[in-house]
Image (spheres, helix red, strand yellow):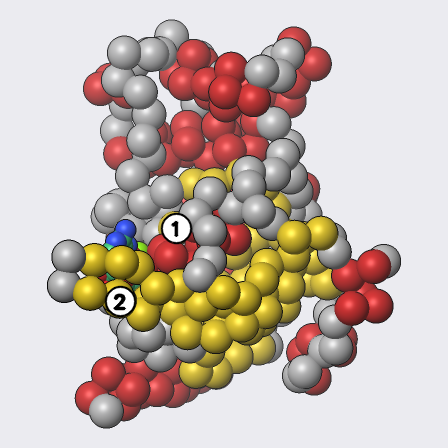
Amino acid sequence: MAAEAQTTPTTAAASARPSTRLVIDKATKIYQTATGPLLALDSFSAEIGEGEFVCVVGPSGCGKTTLLWALSGLHPLTSGAITLDGTPVKGPRPEIGMVFQEANLLPWRNLMKNILFPFEIKRLDAAPYRTRIQHLLETVGLAGFENKFPRELSGGMQQRASLVRCLSFDPSVMLMDEPFGALDAFTRDEMNLLLLKLWSEQRKTIVFVTHSIVEALFMADRILVMTPRPGRLAREVVVNLPRPRTLEMQSSPYFVETAREIKELIHASVKK
Ligand SMILES: Nc1ncnc2c1ncn2[C@@H]1O[C@H](COP(=O)(O)OP(=O)(O)OP(=O)(O)O)[C@@H](O)[C@H]1O
Ligand SMILES: [Mg+2]
């Protein structure tokens, strides 16, 4: 693949990775604000492989959402480049789906019409995807709720609907910005397990932003830890836990110790 020829793996994990899909090369973002320019992201570089589950953690305001929007092609970088499968990401790409912290369902549309919304935006005929959508609804436990409106669904159900909406058109890359951050701990565990199940079935490439180190360790193959703003890559942590992941793993000495190390790294960088 062209992307492989252009990139040089920089870590042991990278060299063991399958083919590189996303290359983030010195991504830099400066926002122009009323009080002057604000450097949000500073020369952030990383590579993400085919089918990899990568989590991004870092202190609030360090540029995680900025990075994700740049990856989506919806918000341009000030300098640096992002490529997907060897071609620059400069606008929305059909291979990319996004899930946000809020489910962002349209209140006046029922569940099915919300799920079909991306097809309208993309002017894509949904008919060939109907079976896929039905299967997804069954997998996430929302079959039978197609005619319900968002206000009739719990927070967890709304987030499951937004997962279906993202997966409905079969993107190969999923960008997720704290998708379960607003949920209670129990529902979040459920959603984490559900996402891992979907990922193992469909092998998407996932970039998942979270505040929770536990969630990152539980989900990821690799964690990108960011510095406080301006966001840079502080460390890359390869997660040495077998799959499928189970909630019991969260109490293993390896899990507890690695979570402590990442927490200390973030705290130390915030204090600097
Ligand atoms: N549109 C914008 N205009 C000006 N400044 C912005 C804009 N979006 C974000 N910022 C600033 O850029 C920095 C990074 O913001 P960003 O939302 O990417 O952080 P984050 O890591 O996602 O934070 P959180 O964990 O709280 O969601 C912050 O200082 C924020 O105030
Ligand atoms: Mg954010």
Query: Going 63% across and 34% down the picture, which residue do you hit?
Result: 94
Q: Quadrant of the N terminus?
A: bottom right
Q: At 20% across and 65% down in the image, what residue appears?
A: 36
Instruction: Indicate the quadrant of ligand 1 in the picture.
Output: bottom left
Q: Residue beneath label 2, please?
A: 38
Query: Where on the picture, by quarter, is residue 66?
Result: bottom left
Secondary structure of residue under mark 2:
strand
Which residue does the numbered mark 1 point to in the structure image?
177
Q: In the picture shown, does residue 192 fall above or below 37?
A: above
Q: Amino acid at mark 1?
A: Asp
x then y, percent, for residue 250:
42, 69
Neighbour tally class for label 2: few under 14, some 14-19, many 20 plus, Cα within 10 Å: some
Q: Residue at x 70, y 57 (%)?
A: 21
Q: Position of residue 62 (x, y in %)?
A: 31, 69
What amino acid does circle 2 point to? Leu
In the rendered structure, the answer to whether residue 3 lies left or right of residue 40 reads right
- Where is 47 relative to 96, above or below? below
